[in-house]
Image (spheres, grey):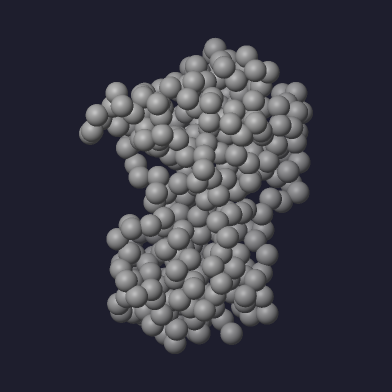
């Protein structure tokens, strides 16, 4: 039997779907299982066992036409639409599959949860409902990425060059998307100084849009690792770290794939829908912080979460 999973993006959503993809690869091990995704995420699955990957650009009528043609040729018996947007619904409708599993209780899905999804729970929890509706056991909330030996060697060489030993450094992501500056917690330098005073090395991580911020932070302390690692390499690096502190961002989800403590700072966004899997108890919000009484609604500035409070939360797990 040929089975298809649809998952196009974005990065955080793809990573939150990895436990579900693991469940499906285990279930269809003796069958032919495919993943249809978009180009930025294809490399995440090149080393994934028992899974074939097909890539289609996310935009343009030519890409849509190419996807439908490919779907019709493949003759899938079952499609799991883990994206369930207008585009993938259209693909499902034209794929010719007998069974079409999706997130919404309407056409073209033949199997779906009974109620509409309107953000009433975490995205992962909802996708688990989709799988349960299709007869599967729920997946554990533990994201995962396969790390190749080549990537492991590259990370080991980087650590050796900078004389970093396992569990004696921490990863800090002080940036966020340029479209969402309110997600940036402004006290990372003070946090980094407190961690260095406790004998830990600090590594500043992020992509090109974090370069200026990380360069400024690294002038005072720590190692600037901006754009040094792709997604899987960053997950491999994180396996060696003691813990990480991040804003609500894609690196938060990448680091969670390493199964280390990841403390996520949330202000303007709803952590209940998007927190990193397996890290529920490490979410830090204004609702938890001692300064909440000084922050009447609707003020939600992350600056009101103090470095001392973040250190207290980290120390409560015996990590300092």
Quarter of the image holding residue 23? Answer: bottom right
Q: Is residue 12 above or below residue 196?
A: below
Residue 44 horizontal/vertical position (percent): 58, 54
Q: Check the picture and name the quadrant holding the N terminus.
A: bottom right
Taking the spot 61% from the left edge, 34% from the top edge, the residue there is 317
Work out whether residue 42 can be spotted: no
Residue 63 in view, yes or no:
yes
194 versus 91 height, above or below: above
Viewer-closest of 243 and 71: 243
Where is residue 121? Give x, y as percent: 38, 57
Q: Is residue 68 left or right of residue 21?
A: left
The quadrant where residue 160 appears:
top right
Q: Position of residue 157 (x, y in %)?
A: 75, 33
**Is 35 placed left or right of 180 in the picture?**
right
Q: Which residue is at a point 60% across and 48% down the rendered structure image? A: 257
Is 204 situated left or right of 303 in this image? right
* Residue in the foreground of this view, choosing between 160 and 174: 174
Quarter that holds the C terminus: top right
Which of 306/52 is in front? 306
Find residue 8 and report its horizontal and vertical position in percent. Answer: 44, 60
Q: Residue at x 72, y 39 (%)?
A: 154
Query: Residue at the top extreme?
Result: 220
Residue at the outermost bottom position? 98
For the point 70% across and 36% down, which residue is it? Answer: 240
99 relative to 277, above or below: below
In the depicted structure, whether residue 317 falls above or below residue 303 = below
């Amino acid at each position: 039997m040929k089975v298809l999973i649809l998952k196009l993006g974005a990065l955080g959503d793809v990573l939150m779907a990895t436990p579900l993809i693991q469940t499906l690869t285990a279930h269809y091990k003796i069958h032919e299982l495919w993943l249809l995704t978009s180009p930025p995420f294809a490399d995440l699955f090149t080393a994934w066992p028992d899974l074939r990957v097909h890539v289609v650009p996310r935009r343009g009528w030519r890409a849509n036409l190419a996807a439908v043609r490919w779907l019709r040729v493949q003759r899938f018996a079952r499609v799991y639409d883990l994206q369930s947007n207008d585009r993938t619904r259209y693909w499902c409708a034209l794929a010719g599959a007998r069974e079409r599993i999706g997130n919404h209780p309407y056409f073209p899905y033949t199997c779906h949860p009974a109620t509409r999804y309107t953000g009433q729970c975490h995205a992962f929890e909802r996708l688990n409902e989709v799988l349960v509706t299709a007869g599967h056991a729920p997946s554990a909330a533990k994201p995962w990425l396969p790390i190749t030996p080549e990537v492991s060697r590259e990370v080991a060489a980087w650590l050796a060059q900078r004389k970093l030993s396992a569990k004696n450094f921490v990863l800090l992501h002080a940036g966020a998307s340029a479209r969402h500056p309110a997600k940036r917690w402004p006290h990372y330098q003070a946090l980094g100084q407190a961690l260095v005073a406790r004998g830990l090395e600090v590594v500043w991580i992020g992509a090109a849009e974090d370069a200026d911020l990380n360069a400024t932070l690294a002038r005072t302390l720590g190692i600037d690792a901006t754009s040094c690692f792709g997604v899987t390499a960053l997950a491999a690096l994180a396996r060696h770290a003691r813990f990480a502190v991040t804003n609500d961002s894609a690196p938060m989800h990448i680091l969670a794939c390493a199964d280390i403590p990841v403390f996520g700072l949330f202000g303007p966004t709803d952590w209940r829908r998007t927190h990193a899997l397996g890290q529920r108890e490490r979410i830090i919000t204004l609702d938890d912080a001692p300064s909440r009484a000084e922050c009447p609604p609707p003020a939600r500035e992350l600056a009101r979460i103090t470095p001392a409070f973040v250190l207290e939360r980290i120390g409560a797990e015996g990590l300092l």
